[in-house]
Image: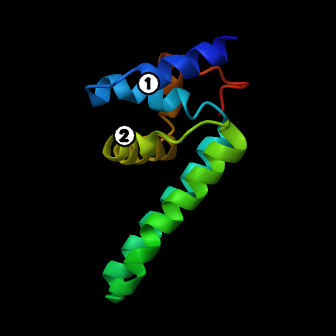
Amino acid sequence: MRRGRDMLRAMTQRYTSFADFWPFYLREHSKAPTRALHYVGTSLVVAIAVGVVLTGRWGWLIALPLAGYAFAWVAHFAVEKNRPATFTYPLWSLAADFRMWRLWLTGRLGPELDRAGVVRKNRSE
């Protein structure tokens, strides 16, 4: 029942600041496999961007959104079973994705998930 109420609130709520959007974003990524697929996509985006800069093969820039969105959308539709926040908040979603990735890489995502109310099976998620 709680999930249904959360989904209804998410559909009707309009976020006016990134600070308010951030906890919502984390709740929309509540399952560890969803976050893992996002990490893969974001890591690929960073690797492709670095490769483009180092090689000057600018045509590879087209792969950036494909790499990022392919993994993210599979995660949302197949794992999380929700609508990607990108459809409503494209720029904040992009910023939040990189923030989540950075916090995960530095081992500081857990407290953020806790503050957002994300229930985790174990503390290592």
For the C terminus, the quadrant is top right
Q: On residue 89, which mark appears?
A: 2
Q: Nearer the viewer, mark 1 or mark 2?
A: 2
- Mark 1 is surrounded, within 10 Å at the Cα level, by few (under 14), some (14 to 19) or many (20 or more) other residues, namely some
Q: Earlier in the sequence, mark 1 or mark 2?
A: 1
For the N terminus, the quadrant is top right
User: In the figure, is residue 104 to the left or right of 49?
Assistant: right
Residue 29, position as x, y percentages in the image: 57, 35
Q: Residue at x 33, y 40 (%)?
A: 92
15 shown above or below 88: above
Viewer-nearest residue: 33 or 123:
33
Viewer-nearest residue: 119 or 81:
81
Q: Residue at x 43, y 68 (%)?
A: 64
Amino acid residing under circle 1: Pro
20 shown above or below 32: above
- Mark 1–mark 2 Cα distance, whole angstroms, equals 14 Å
The residue that mark 1 highlights is: 23
Residue 21, position as x, y percentages in the image: 37, 28
Residue 40, position as x, y percentages in the image: 58, 57
46 shown above or below 104: below
Q: Of all residues shown, which one is farthest toward the left?
A: 16
Cβ atoms under marks 1 and 2 closer than 8 Å = no
Residue 118, position as x, y percentages in the image: 58, 22
Image quadrant assignment for residue 119: top right
Q: On residue 121, which mark appears?
A: none
Q: Residue at x 38, y 85 (%)?
A: 59
74 shown above or below 80: below
Amino acid residing under circle 2: Tyr
